[in-house]
Amino acid sequence: MKKIIIYPGSFDPVTYGHLDIIERGLKICEQLIVAVSSNPLKRTLFSIEERVILLKEVTKKMKNVQVEKFDGLLVDFLKRKEARIVIRGLRAVSDFEYEFQMVLANRRLNESMETIFMMPSESYFYLSSSLIKELVALGADISGYTPKFVENELKRKIPYAQS
Ligand code: PNS
């Protein structure tokens, strides 16, 4: 059986930080599934379909990467994929509490699920989808933060102040 790893998240939108984690994850599995959450309680800039399209575009050259949307519980998605391992990126101490809570909540739902945390390259340590959205809204240059394709879609979505 193939060693599958699931990388779940909102990806609103995908950043170079996420791509860094995908590349690291690929080193320790045979197939990596990016699982895009369609949580209706979370307001997102991009629809679930758009987030999947963006991810598919920026990972199209990566072998062994699949992008799928999911709703409902992550543990149920894992069961459907016959997977047990999840990866998440961990940037700063501030990420820890939320991640810790999620691991424990998921463990209560499925004892056999394990989460591996990976640290992105230090150049992406401060990077987040929220930060990028704010920068675009303020008209700042985000070329080093996300691929051009995503940058263009962001600029179409967010009318930004032009000097
Ligand atoms: O990128 P995010 O928003 O930090 O990702 C959070 C995500 C999607 C991984 C998390 O909210 C999740 O797993 N959602 C699915 C619903 C679920 O299983 N919730 C219980 C575990 S906390």
Image (spheres, rainbow, N blue to C red):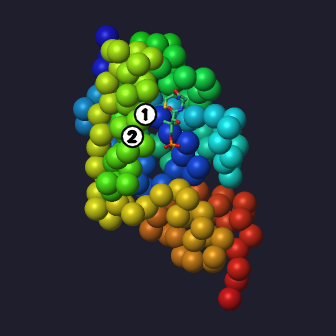
Q: Viewer-proximal residue, 15 or 113?
A: 113
What number is the disc on residue 99?
Answer: 2
Question: Quick check: is the Cβ at mark 1 less than 8 Å away from ligand 1?
Answer: yes
> What is the spatial separation of the Cα atoms under label 2 and label 1, in whole angstroms?
5 Å
Query: In which quadrant is the N terminus drawn?
Result: top left
Percent x, y of residue 98: 42, 43
Q: Looking at numbered disc 2 in the image, what kind of residue is underneath it?
A: Glu
Q: Classify mark 1: helix, strand or loop.
A: helix
Residue 103 shows in the view: yes
The residue wearing badge 1 is 102
Percent x, y of residue 127: 43, 61
- Reply above or below: 20 against 78: below
Residue 64 shows in the view: no
- Reply above or below: 80 against 65: above
Name the residue: 68% across, 46% down.
43
- Reply above or below: 113 against 146: above
Percent x, y of residue 49: 68, 38
Q: Viewer-proximal residue, 42 or 122?
A: 42
In the image: residue 12, left or right of residue 50: left
Q: Looking at numbered disc 1 in the image, what kind of residue is underneath it?
A: Met
- Reply above or below: 79 against 125: above
In the image: residue 142, left or right of residue 64: right
